[in-house]
Image (cartoon, helix red, strand yellow):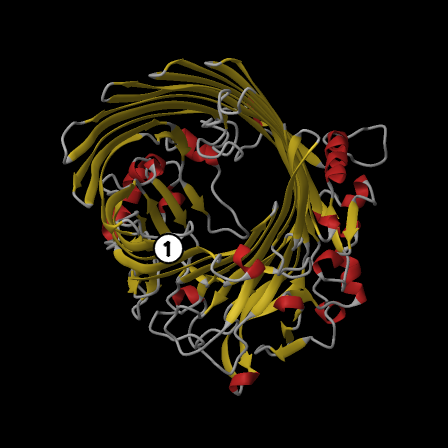
Amino acid sequence: MVEIETKSGLDYGEFAFNVSVEGETNFERDFGEEYQINGTIAKELTPSFGIAATLQYRNTDRLNYDVSILDTVPPVLPEGYTSIFFVPASFEFPFDPALDQQLVTSTSYLRRERAEEAFVGSVNLAWDIASHTRLRLDLQRNVRDSEGSDSRTAIGFLTSSLDMPIPELDGEVRRRTTLRALRPSIAFRSTDQKFTSDTISFRGDTHVGRWEFEYKLGYSKARQEGSNTSITLLGNSFTNLEDLIDPATLETAPDDDAAQTERVIAGGFIPGPDGLPLPSLTAEGFALIGDPGEYDLFSAVTNPIDSPSESYIGEFQARYNTPLGFLEYVELGGKYDSSKRQTVGNVTNPRNVTSQRYLRIFGAESDLALFDPNLLGADDISLIGIDAFDLPYLSASGGRTIFDLLPGYTEDDPATAINEERFTFTDFTQLDPIADGSGNLVPTETTEDNWATYLESKFVFGDLSVIAGVRYEREKRNGFTISSPSVRLDEPGFRSEDRETFVQAGLVRFANTGGTVDTWTPSFLATYRPHPNIAARLGYFRSTVNPDFRLLNRNTQYSVDLRPGFGRVTILEANPDLKPSTTDNIDLDLAYYFDDTPGLVRAGFFYKKINNNFTNVNFTAVDDDGVRQRFLDEFAPLAESRPDLLALPEDTEFLVNLPTNGEGGKIWGLEFELIRRLDFLPGFLSDFGVLANATYTNGHFPTLVSARSDDNEIIQLSLDRPLRDQARWVYNLSLDYDRDGFQGRVIYTSQSATVEAFDEFNLNTVVPSYDTLDARLSYTFDNFGGLWSIFLEGDDLLRGAEDADIRSTTSSQFGDGAAFFSYPQAYQFNGGRTVTMGIRARF
């Protein structure tokens, strides 16, 4: 629900009219722009009744690029192993320091365009009934139309894993990943959505003697509707890599077969700006990836979006200001909110559905040139500093053309010489959600009811004050989804058992995802003021994160692989005994407030004790017979009709996927802050001010990861590593200037690297450190009967349009090994520096 907290119609004076216009663009304007217009008019109709109306319009048009990397690390495995997933944790990476540890196999370029238009209008009615009661009514409508498309072009190679001599290891035979064939692909998605919401909020406060009351009622109704489309283009495979890869970078090595076949072991990519891997191809290779005749249209899908929601909210709090010297007040409050959301599709993701699908008939010709030889665009991507090749992509207009032409290729026209029947068309709106697939249309409804109440008091003992309280919350949710088994068959290709088999056996079921959780949150804040300029604070509160309902209550699902050498039965089930994760937080700080100017110097210490964290590892080895018997019991209805589905390979591995609570951990850190006007300096220097703060964070938080033992069993390792998702150092430094209506500010921010995931071989997923520089300039003056402000803002001033924002790397950082390596995995280009200009007027 949208919370409305606008200025009231009695807060502007007798009459006010405010308007502002601003626009934002990158220094490189091809990345798009945004502008908005805001206006407010307010009038006191009587000294106790006023009205205010606000209207905002925003228009956004943006382009950006993402580049993601697929690689094999390492390309050569230790002796005797055929997959890194079977290498035990006792091995230390890099396994062979003499070898290059990364083989880039694909770079994927995502070209994203977004256009959005939004209107927000609100009206506030303010009525001061008397000195003891104020009432406010807020009405708001929000309308947002958005269209977007993204085209992802993957330039990559198919790979093979072969046992072959390794020249770098004096011919020792190992399992090595090689490049087998060049195969590009293009995936296109588009969105066309409209979001509309209407919100009503009534609030007020009343003071009667020592009593203070605050109350609020709200209602919100929203609807998101529209559609998404997706198109998949599969490129042809080209095995003549000696003709397609630049001979200056091509690397080959002989196989161990009788013919001593040369295999491509590297050279498909070369490092570009910021280490970005660029395809190293010949003119023939680049021509193939840009030829629309080399891409087959595999599928085209339309997904509906129709998600209405409703929510209600009610809040009330009462405070009694006591006459007692040691007890300042006692406050009691409560809150209730109820929401209902309907979706067409998956209960957790209304976009994860399929409404209508065109699917290529196997063997039928379906290359893009069949539709229109000019469908593919060519982006030279020089905007992001790459001018080595033109990037083929599918535009929004090209996507619409494909959907317009596809109906003509679902049935053969006997009057023509060619067979037009090349695609099957399925309308899933006419199918049963259980019999025809959980990924298709499933009307669902989710309801949530939340209650909360709290009690708070403030005690005063001379220079010491203590605010203490406790909060209770109950959250109740109802919803459902569909679950079914999956079985991968021992047949060539990727072949899974048809869903109809499990439908007839009664193994496809609705699963309830509802539940109720209760939370208690105690807290206190003690403040000691031995001097008007000095304050020492000690605070404690407990925060609680409840597990997702699907982890507590969902149908058990079975995933089976019947291929010899890959045999596995995995049971995915909920854990009704999963406990909420709680954090006990303690904060201590000491602050000195300056006498002569607003500002302070503050130092603080914080400590957090986390209990029952949710582990990111939920594969646990269990007794084979127990899992085997559960599998046989579940699949018993198929024992007579399909005994082959119960015939497990001899080497089958039995696993259970069960979320569990971790052992928790401890986090601590320090905070420093300085805010000060430099008015003690001479001349113009006295008009400057400084704001600086720094935060240091450390902790002991054992991390659980899945690994293999030397006996080839799945185990859980507890790694003593730094805290995930938390930078060790964060700095902010700001210098501002204020004189005679002119204001300026420069802000520098720096954050050290953070780790997102740990690995037993130190192949950690790391977000690199970054820093930013922003600036603000404005001039305010009186003219034409109003107060005017002209402002100029610059953001991300350290980054140019061609400078990559590296979002993640595979790195040894934060590990415990001796080697150092960093392989970037995700780049983002948002256009770099932006500038915003605008003007505001108040009358």
Give residue 370's quadrant in the image: top right
Task: Return the x and y of residue 767 as percentages of the image width and height.
Answer: 48, 60
Vertical order, 18 against 660 (above or below): above
In this rendering, the answer to whether 743 lies above or below 20 is below
Q: Does 171 appear above or below 785?
A: below
Residue 464 point in image, percent of width and height = 19, 45
- In this rendering, would 207 be left or right of 149? left
Q: Quadrant of residue 32?
A: top right
Which residue is depicted at the point 55% across and 84% down? 168
| Residue name at image x 72 percent, y 62 percent | 385
Residue 326 location (% of width, % of height): 14, 36
* Residue 232 shows in this picture: no
Q: Which residue position holds label 1?
A: 649
Can residue 629 be seen at all in this image of the molecule?
yes
Nearest the eye: 638 or 404: 404
Does residue 833 appear left or right of residue 310 in this picture? right
Q: Position of residue 731 (x, y in %)?
A: 45, 60
Quadrant location of the N terminus in the rendered image = top left
Going by the numbered disc 1, the residue's amino acid type is Pro
10 Å crowding of disc 1: few (<14), some (14-19), many (20+): some
Q: Is residue 623 above or below residue 366?
A: below
* SS state under label 1: loop
- For the residue pair 620 and 517, the one nearer the viewer reads as 517
Quarter occupied by the C terminus: top right
Residue found at the very far front of the displayed protein: 683
Residue sitting nearer the eye, 421 or 323: 323
168 left or right of 370 in image: left
Q: How many marks?
A: 1
